[in-house]
């Protein structure tokens, strides 16, 4: 479904003949879709969509952050193109607390918005030119496309052209992690920050991480063999006392087989406890 959602969003870009980031006028794209965009203060949500027949009004809560406002518009356009016939009140910046009764619809609208604001034909060549993008380069991309650094970084993982995991940690541990599709599922991130990670230093001591730096992979991964590999790490302070993290895996981490021991539990006799029993 995600691929179809992305294709529908990027088809709008092709139909409008958009070929440069500065041509991604989200209000004009909405107008072409017969959606009027209105900016008004709102309580309890960031955006709403009300449609009737072939026209709709998207109301956006002004935030003063252009990237956030543009994503809100693009998110509501996603609802209009994908879920027409329904009305929505959305916390676009926080899907986990979205006011919609169906979070899957919110994820689809998020995906539509990301493809619309950072379409592959425009985004991928820029990313490819960097080799292994740093946060500084992603910030420049976000500026050119008028998107937030969070949206831009998540899109990096989504396009699956880099061996990257994007994660969010706070002092208590992992909030979420988004791996590129080709990252082997055997690699499991630690729930708590390792004191040797640059992200730990950033959150606890304010030590900035100006570029990608190598780390033993066992600083980040729970696998017993992680110490045989290296990753590149960079981190950036995000909202609410969290850190946004880039982790690039080395190529040899894609060649190793499954790790059958990860997440397995054993009894006092050393026998494996099947998952269905351990849940009792």
Image (cartoon, grey):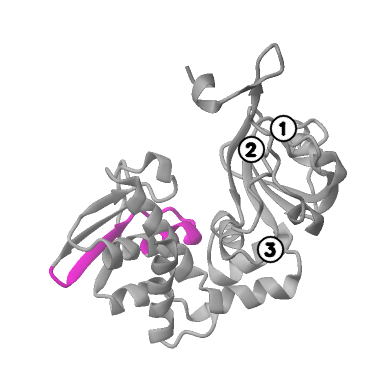
Q: Measure the alpha-carbon separation of dots 3 and 2.
A: 21 Å
Q: Are marks 2 and 1 in contact (CB under 8 Å)?
A: yes
Q: Nearer the viewer, mark 3 or mark 2?
A: 3
**Location of residue 202 by image quarter:** top right
Residue 212, image x, y percentages? 80, 54
User: In this rendering, is residue 86 above or below 103?
Assistant: below
Residue identifier under label 3: 162
Residue 211 appears in the figure: no
Q: In terms of sequence position, does the residue under pointer 2 or pointer 1 come before the other?
A: 2
Pinpoint residue 270: horizontal percent, then vertical percent. 71, 17
| Sequence-earlier tag: 3 or 2 | 3
Residue receiving disc 1: 193
- Rendered residue at 56%/25% (across/down): 274
Residue at image point 57% right, 42% down: 239
Q: Nearer the viewer, residue 279 or 116?
A: 279
* Residue under the point 44% across and 49% down: 93
Q: Which residues are magenta?
A: 53-73
Image x and y of residue 141, in percent? 63, 68
Q: Is residue 67 left or right of residue 74?
A: right
């Amino acid at each position: 479904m995600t691929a179809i959602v992305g294709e529908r969003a990027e088809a709008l870009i092709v139909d409008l003949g958009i070929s440069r980031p500065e041509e991604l006028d989200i209000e004009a794209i909405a107008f072409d879709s017969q959606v009027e965009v209105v900016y008004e203060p709102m309580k309890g949500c960031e955006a709403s969509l009300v449609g009737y027949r072939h026209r709709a009004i998207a109301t956006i809560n002004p935030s003063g952050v252009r990237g956030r406002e543009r994503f809100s518009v693009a998110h509501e356009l996603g609802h209009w193109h994908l879920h027409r016939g329904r009305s929505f009140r959305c916390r676009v910046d926080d899907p986990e607390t979205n006011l919609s009764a169906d979070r899957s619809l919110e994820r689809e609208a998020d995906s539509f918005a990301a493809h619309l604001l950072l379409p592959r034909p425009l985004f991928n060549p820029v990313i490819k030119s960097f080799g292994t993008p740093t946060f500084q380069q992603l910030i420049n991309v976000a500026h050119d496309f008028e998107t937030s650094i969070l949206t831009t970084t998540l899109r990096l993982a989504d396009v699956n052209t880099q061996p990257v995991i994007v994660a969010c940690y706070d002092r208590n541990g992992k909030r979420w992690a988004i791996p590129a599709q080709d990252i082997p599922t055997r690699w499991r991130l630690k729930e708590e920050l390792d004191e040797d990670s640059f992200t730990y230093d950033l959150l606890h001591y304010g030590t900035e991480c100006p570029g990608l730096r190598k780390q033993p992979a066992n600083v980040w991964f729970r696998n017993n063999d992680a110490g045989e590999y290296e990753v590149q790490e960079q981190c950036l302070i995000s909202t609410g006392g969290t850190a946004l993290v880039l982790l690039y895996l080395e190529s040899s981490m894609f060649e190793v087989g499954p790790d059958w021991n990860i997440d397995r539990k054993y009894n006092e006799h050393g026998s494996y406890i099947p998952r269905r029993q351990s849940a009792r």
